[in-house]
Image (cartoon, rainbow, N blue to C red):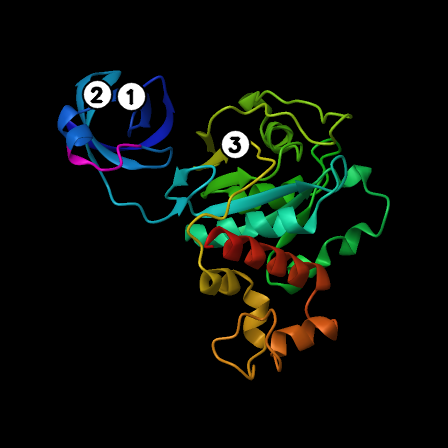
Amino acid sequence: MKQHGRILKVYNSVLHVAAEDAVILCKLRGRIKKGRSDTEILPGDIVVLDRISPKEGVIEHVEQRSNLLQRPRVANLTQIVITVAAASPDPHPLVVSRFLVLAECSGAARIVLCINKMDLYRGDSEHFLAEYEAAGYPVLRVSAECGTGLDDLRRRLAGEITVFAGPSGAGKSSLLNALDPSLALVTGAVSEKIGRGRHTTRRAELLPFMNGYVVDTPGFTQQELTEISQEKLTACFSEFSKYGGCRFAPCSHSHEPGCAVKAAAAAGEISRERYDAYIALLDEIRSKKK
């Protein structure tokens, strides 16, 4: 019996597929392996499977993806929640912007910045990381430990396919456990020696949540910007688009005289931290092309 399903996780060459009535353990049909230049099937992929028993099947076809987050690699998302910690470890502007660029490049419809561990922050919590709100991102300030802000986050997750992505130690698994204790995800502490979190999530997996799915993903200390052009990077900083009238076109907004974006950053109209992160990422892309 042929039917559609969604890949929940891939483990030891077994694909766990959510069908209409059950989770089916599937293998790939041999001709799919031979006919694809990229045989990697990812969590979130929509597939056609042949049901050979109530709990087993064979995947016949993989549908075209609507979007793809490159790292962690998850397909067909509706939302990405970039999760960072307010403290322990402190958020770094370059790391935050790097994750936001990767989210922008995925093609997902919605991107949210979620700041966990607000209970550890001692400053003006209402305006913490407000520069990202000014850049156009919804910013949620939450605490998995205290439960602060979780109702708003829960509403945003309902009916969506949401990836939680971010650096190690941000508390993604703890946050998901606070939203739904039945998930029982393994969590870890931040290393005092290196100031970073330990990787507790080993692989991406779609978990049913409020008529949709949430995806807990491995944390990363470094994210490579592979195959991103200078023009695409600029487009990922949407706040730059408000400032036209650069003397040169195209303008990289880095060294050119008469650059409206540089002038806006100098005047404080664009966050200096965001602009500096853009220049650092631009230099990284340029160095890889040499």
In the picture provided, is 135 more to the left or to the right than 109?
A: right
Q: Assign a secondary structure to mark 1.
A: strand
The amino acid beneath tag 1 is: Ile
Q: How many marks?
A: 3
Q: Residue at x 84, y 52 (%)?
A: 124
Q: Residue at x 61, y 71 (%)?
A: 255
Q: Which disc, if any, is residue 57?
A: 2
Q: Report whether residue 109 is seen.
A: no
Quick one: 52 or 271, which is closer to the camera?
Answer: 271
Callout 2 touching callout 1 (CB < 8 Å): yes
Give the CA distance from mark 2 to mark 1. 6 Å
User: Is 266 covered by the magenta stretch?
Assistant: no
User: Is 38 covered by the magenta stretch?
Assistant: yes
Q: Residue at x 67, y 32 (%)?
A: 169
Locate residue 289, reporting x and y percent.
45, 54
The amino acid beneath tag 3 is: Asp
Neighbourhood count class around disc 3 (C-alpha, 10 Å): few under 14, some 14–19, many 20 upward: many
Give the CA distance from mark 3 to mark 1. 21 Å
Magenta span of residues: 35-40
Q: Residue furthest front?
A: 290
Neighbourhood count class around disc 1 (C-alpha, 10 Å): few under 14, some 14–19, many 20 upward: many
Residue at label 1? 24
Q: Report whether residue 270 is seen.
A: yes
In the picture provided, is 231 more to the left or to the right than 192?
A: left
The amino acid beneath tag 2 is: Gly
Q: Assign a secondary structure to mark 3.
A: strand
Disc with the residue nearer the chain's start (3 vs 1): 1
